[in-house]
Every structure is written in C-alpha cells, then in structure tokens.
C-alpha cells in the first residue's frame, strides 16, 4: 500500500508529505460477517498472509545451525491455530522485527516494514492490531531520538514512522468522536464518597443551588491530522502511547521492558535525585514540630549542602546545553507526552502479573523522571512521579515483610517433627 509520502529531512518531512484518509480504511471489508465460521477462517487466512509477507520483508536470519537454509521461524508461526496471537508472543519474531526497525535506514516512506505495520494496523483483526501496538515503544523511541538528535551528515526521512503513528492517532480520533476524555471528581464536602446523608442539615439559604458535579478533563478533543507537524508531534505520539496503554494487559513482557528502558533514557542521565526516596531522613527530628530548641549545624553539613547545590547547578547547565553526549538521549517531555508515559509506567510498576524485571525497570524509569521533573520544575510531573515512587516503596516493603514472615514461620517450626492437626476440644457441661 502506497503511503503517498515524500522523503525529506527529519525537520521538514512532517510538513511536506500528505496522508490518505484513514477513516474509510478502518472499516472492515468482510462481506460474510453473518457466517461465523467463514469469518473465523478469513481471519486466519488474513493473519497467515500477513505473516508470510512479513517473512519475505525481513532479512534472513543468521542463526541457522548448520549454515544451510533453516526453517523460517515466522513461517512456522503461520501454521498455528492462532497465527496472529503466536506472532504477538514470539520472542524470536520480536527480536527480528526490532533489529529491522533499529537499522539506520528504517523509518523512511519506502521502508517495506513500515508499510506492513501500517496496513496491518488498518486490518479488522484485533490480534494483528496488538502485534503493531507491541512495537510502538520501539518505534516511538527511534522516531523521537532521530527527531531531536538528527544525524547532520546524512539526514533521513521519517515519513514511514509518522505514517504508523498517524494511523494510531486517526483511529483514536475516530473512537473519541470529537469528545474530551473526562473523569468525575467526588465531592469531598460530603461525609462519604459513595453515600449521601439521609437527614442532611437544613441549609441557611432557603433556595440553595444544586451542586454541580466536578468534572476533570484528562484529554482535550482531538483534531484530525493529515501530517505530523512539529507543534502536534508530542500530542500525536502521546495519543499513540495512550492506545498502547489501553491494551497494555495484552502486551508481551519484552515490549513493556523495552518501554521502561526507553522512558528512563528519555529522562536523561542518572542523577543523585533518583535516590532521594531511598534514604531515610536522619537529619529530621520529630520534636517541637520537627525542630529542636537549639539548632546546631555542623561544618560537614554545610559542605554537604554546598556540594549538592554545586552539582545541581552543573546538572541544570548540562540540561540546557546544546551539546548532547553519546549516552545522553534526553528529549523534551511536555505533559501531553509525559502523561501517557506515566500511566504505562504505573501499570508496569504496580501490575500484579508483571515480571520482576519489568517492575525494576519501571522503578528506575520513574525515579529518573522524578529527577528530570525536579530539575525542570514541573509540578504535576513531580507529584505524579513522587506518588508512583512511594507506592512502589510501600509495595516492596509489604512484599519483603510477607517474605520475612514466611521465612520466620518456616524456620520456627521443627522440620523433623511432622505437624499434627489438633483435635477439637470437647467441653463437658454438667447440669
């Protein structure tokens, strides 16, 4: 499928190309929807054809055991009962596609893999859409890195990545139907969040006005976009990440782990602020509202504060510097982009079914984002990241306490003596 996109530099590619209308492509083209068996088989056939096409696009794998022509792992996925689901949970397929997306020549309008991702997301199969969403963290990371840290020697077009992002943005715009995303805020003046008093006190005003429900706007109505402009880039990527968050329970572990690593790299290099919540406040005294009658400040404390202020000044200077090091891939993080990032990290951090590797990576990403927000002085980002850090600490402390209790109970009982169930006591009452 042709993107109808023209190549250009990363800074100007967003304003040059045009994009076909996506609304008509989002409609399913199945003419036999009344027959469930035919629809099921057509879905299987479409998924198999998409997998075979993907196998022809990707470069041949170099992991063949005997050096001859081995069986393609992607082709074997097409022979399963649920080929789209098998492609989603295949780590070998994720490695191959990630390597192709990370190549220096990826992301252009002529990239066949971007064509495949675009056409696959516009299909009516929900499992195929999940496959495309699982690679959104990698696409967003590569796209934002090349936009904010372009290669001056050989600028590349990113219209292929932008086409995939616009496909997700267009589908979400159509789903919201021009309405904002809102939440209902409970009225804290009531004695309960879930009940109203049976005998409310009579107000002094004989004609009181009914209280209006408090509505909070999470996201403003979306406007259709035909190209990724520089002023709308953060909004488009943020909406695409919001689509990823809505299906995050279906995402594989490696996709969540990669997103946590990318979020940590977006925040910038490590900073001492990341460990602020890991140290106990030893210098605070809980007497007289936190202060002693006599306050003694030692020379070592003054030097400590001076060192921290000096390091903070250096870090702020580095943040505003135009020279970016090799390991520093910091990008601008406006709230419309940071908000869905924090939602995804919150799931990765507190989801009960997530692996420990995902939780640890999310914990590091949240701490780095807190340090970044502290330096940038973004109040809502500081509040959100601090809340996630405190929730993570409490969850880990509760898990450690439960594990210690299990160990102590196991060590307290004699392993050589089998435990016997006590017989119920029978009380004889004489009349």
Image: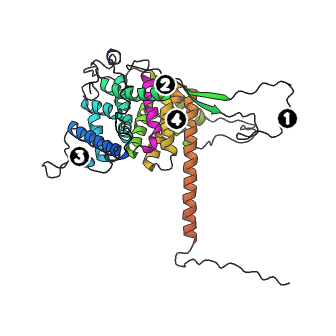
Q: How far apart are marks 1 and 4 (CA)?
A: 49 Å
Numbered circle sitting on residue 334: 2
Disc 3 packing (10 Å; few <14; some 14–19; many ≥20): some
From the viewer's perspective, is 317 left or right of 38?
right
Numbered circle sitting on residue 273: 4
**Which of the image's four quarters has the C terminus?**
bottom right
Disc 1 packing (10 Å; few <14; some 14–19; many ≥20): few
The quadrant where residue 422 appears: bottom right
Numbered circle sitting on residue 75: 3
Q: Are marks 3 and 2 in contact (CB under 8 Å)?
A: no
**Colour convention of the picture:** rainbow
Q: Nearer the viewer, mark 3 or mark 2?
A: 3
Q: Main secondary structure of the magenta part?
A: helix
Numbered circle sitting on residue 201: 1
Q: Position of residue 66 (x, y in %)?
A: 14, 52
From the viewer's perspective, is 71 left or right of 246?
left
Q: Which of marks 1 and 4 is in front?
A: 1
Q: Which residue is drawn at 50% across and 35% down?
A: 342
Point out the tag, 3 or 4, that comes first from the N-terminus. Answer: 3
Q: Is mark 2 on a helix, strand or loop?
A: loop
- Magenta span contains residue 92: no
Q: Where is residue 212 in the image (x, y as percent from the top left)?
A: 71, 27
Numbered circle sitting on residue 62: none
Point out the tag, 1 or 4, that comes first from the N-terminus. Answer: 1
Name the foreground residue: 271 vs 294: 271
């Amino acid at each position: 499928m042709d993107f109808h996109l023209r190549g250009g530099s990363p800074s100007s590619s967003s304003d040059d190309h045009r994009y076909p209308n996506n609304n008509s492509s989002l409609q399913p083209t199945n003419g036999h929807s009344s027959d469930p068996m035919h629809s099921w088989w057509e879905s299987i056939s479409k998924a198999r054809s998409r997998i075979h096409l993907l196998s022809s696009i990707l470069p041949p794998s170099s992991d063949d055991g005997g050096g001859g022509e081995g069986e393609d792992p992607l082709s074997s996925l097409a022979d399963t009962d649920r080929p789209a689901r098998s492609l989603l949970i295949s780590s070998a397929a994720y490695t191959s596609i990630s390597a192709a997306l990370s190549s220096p020549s990826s992301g252009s309008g002529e990239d066949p893999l971007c064509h495949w991702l675009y056409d696959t997301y516009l299909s009516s199969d929900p499992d195929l859409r999940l496959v495309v969403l699982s690679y959104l963290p990698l696409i967003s990371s590569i796209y934002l890195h090349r936009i904010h840290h372009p290669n001056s020697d050989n600028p590349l077009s990113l219209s292929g990545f932008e086409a995939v992002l616009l496909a997700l943005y267009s589908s979400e715009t159509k789903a919201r139907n021009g309405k904002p995303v809102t939440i209902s805020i409970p009225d804290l003046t009531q004695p309960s969040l879930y009940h109203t008093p049976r005998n409310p006190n009579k107000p002094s005003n004989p004609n009181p006005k009914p209280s209006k429900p408090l509505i909070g706007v999470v996201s403003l109505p979306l406007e259709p976009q035909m190209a990724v402009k520089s002023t709308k880039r953060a909004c488009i990527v943020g909406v695409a990440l919001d689509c990823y968050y809505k299906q995050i329970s279906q995402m594989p572990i490696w996709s969540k782990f990669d997103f946590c690593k990318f979020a940590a790299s977006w925040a910038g290099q490590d900073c001492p602020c990341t460990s602020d919540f890991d140290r106990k406040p030893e210098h605070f005294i809980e007497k007289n509202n936190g202060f002693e009658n006599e306050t003694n400040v030692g020379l070592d404390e003054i030097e400590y504060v001076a060192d921290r202020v000096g390091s903070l000044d250096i870090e702020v200077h580095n943040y505003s510097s135009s020279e970016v090091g090799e390991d520093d891939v910091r990008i601008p993080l406006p709230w419309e982009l940071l908000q869905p990032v924090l939602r995804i990290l919150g799931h990765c951090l507190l989801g009960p079914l997530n692996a420990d590797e995902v939780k640890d990576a999310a914990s590091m990403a949240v701490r780095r984002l807190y340090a970044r927000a502290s330096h940038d002085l973004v109040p809502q980002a500081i509040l959100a990241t601090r809340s996630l850090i405190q929730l993570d600490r409490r969850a880990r402390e509760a898990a450690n306490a439960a594990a210690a209790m299990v160990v102590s109970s196991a060590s307290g009982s004699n392993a050589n003596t089998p435990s016997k169930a006590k017989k119920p006591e029978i009380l004889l009452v004489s009349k």
